[in-house]
Image (tube, rainbow, N blue to C red):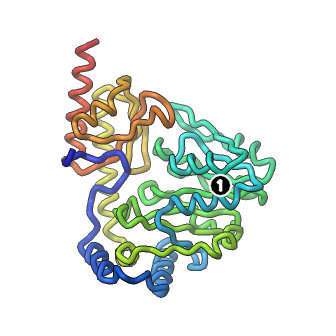
Amino acid sequence: MLNEIKLNMNEMPYLPPREVIEAAQKGLSNLNRYANPRDLELLRGLLAAYSGVSKKNIILSTGSDPLLREIIHVFSRRRKVIMVNPSFFPTVQCAKEFVTKLIKIQLRPPEFNLDADIITSETNEPSLVIIDNPNNPTGKILIDREMAKTILDNKNTLLVVDEAYHEFSGVTFADMVEEHSNLSVVRTLDKAFGLAGARIGYLIAGEDFLDAFSTFYAFLPQSSLYSAMEAVKDPSYIKKNIKLTIKERERVGKKLKEMGLQVYPSTTNFLLIKSNIPSVARELKDKGILVLDLSNQWLPDYIRVSLGTLKENNIFLSSMKEILRICNKGE
C-alpha cells in the first residue's frame, strides 16, 4: 500500500530543516569516499558539547543497536545480565543470543513500576544492568537518579541506560558518567532529531567501558555524517518538533480515553494502548495504518502507537472509532 501511515516505528513525522537536508545532499557528492576522520572527530565534539560531557567519552555508531549489541557481546561473558521486560526488542533478541545468565524483571500493568530492591538483590555477583529510560514500549521513566546511584555504588555492576527518548522526557544521566566509571548512556539521533534515515547513534561511555571500545570504529556514510553535523550544530529545531509531538500525544491520548480505551501515561513520542479487540492492529493495517502489535513480544491486547502529524493522527483516531463502533455493534 503506497500511502500507508507509519505509526509503528517511533519516527519523528517532521522533516529536519532545509540546512540539514542540504548537508545530507552535500555528503552524497562524496559518495565514492570514506568519511574523513576529521569530520568524525568534529561530530564527536559537537555531540560532547550537546551532551555536556568530554569528547573522550563519545563513541559513534551507525545507530544505537550496534552499541548495545557490542556491550552485551563484550561484557556478558563473565557477568549476569539484568534487563526489564518488556524492553527495546533488538536488545532483548541480542541478549537471548549471547547471554548465558539472563534475568528479566517483569514490568506489570497497570503501573509498570521497576522495583529497585529486585535489582539490588540480583546484583549480588558481577552484573550488567541494561535499562531503557524512558522504557519502550510503556513510555514510562523507570529509574531516577537515586536509583541509578544505588545501582552504581556496587562497583561490580555495570549500568547501561538507553536514552533514545530523553529529549522528550527531559531525564538524563549523562552528567553522571564522569563521576561513575561503571555507567554508560546510549543515545540516538533517530528520534527527536528526525534523522532515522541517517542512522546515527552514540555512546557516552564511562571509563570502565572505554577500553572495550578502543577498536570500535564506525565508518559513517557521508550523507549521514554531514546531516548529523549540521543538525547537532544547531539543534534548536528539535524543541519545536518535541513541543508539537507532546501536544499531539496529549490530544490523541485524551481522544482515545474518550473512546473507552486504556491509554498509559507517556514521556516519549508514542502511546501504549490496551484494547479488548485482539485484531485491532490487523484491522488498522487493513485501513492503511501501521501500529506495533505487542502480542507476540509481550502481552495480548496491547499496541504501541507513534505520534504522527496532525492529519495522520486524525486518520488514526477516526479509524479506531470506526473499528470500535463495528466491534461494539457486533457484541
Q: Would residue 121 appear left or right of 4 to someone viewing this image?
A: right
Residue at image position (76%, 48%) is 123
Q: Quadrant of the rendered structure where residue 189 is?
A: bottom left
Residue at image position (33%, 79%) is 27
Q: Decide which of 231, 227 is in the foreground and name it.
A: 227
Question: Taking 110 as reference, is 4 above or below it?
Answer: below
Residue 52 in view here: no
Residue 146 in view here: yes
Q: Decide which of 188, 248 is in the foreground and name it.
A: 188
Q: Position of residue 212 (x, y in %)?
A: 68, 69
Q: Would residue 259 appear left or right of 96 to someone viewing this image?
A: left
Residue at image position (56%, 47%) is 93
Q: Position of residue 223 (x, y in %)?
A: 35, 75
* Residue found farthest to the right: 125
Question: Taking 139 as reference, is 17 above or below it?
Answer: below
Residue at disc 1, secondary structure = helix
Q: Decide which of 311, 215 is in the foreground and name it.
A: 215
Q: Position of residue 195 (x, y in %)?
A: 36, 65
Q: Which residue is mark 1?
A: 148
The C terminus sits in image quarter:
top left
* Residue found farthest to the front: 32
> Which amino acid, mark 1?
Ala
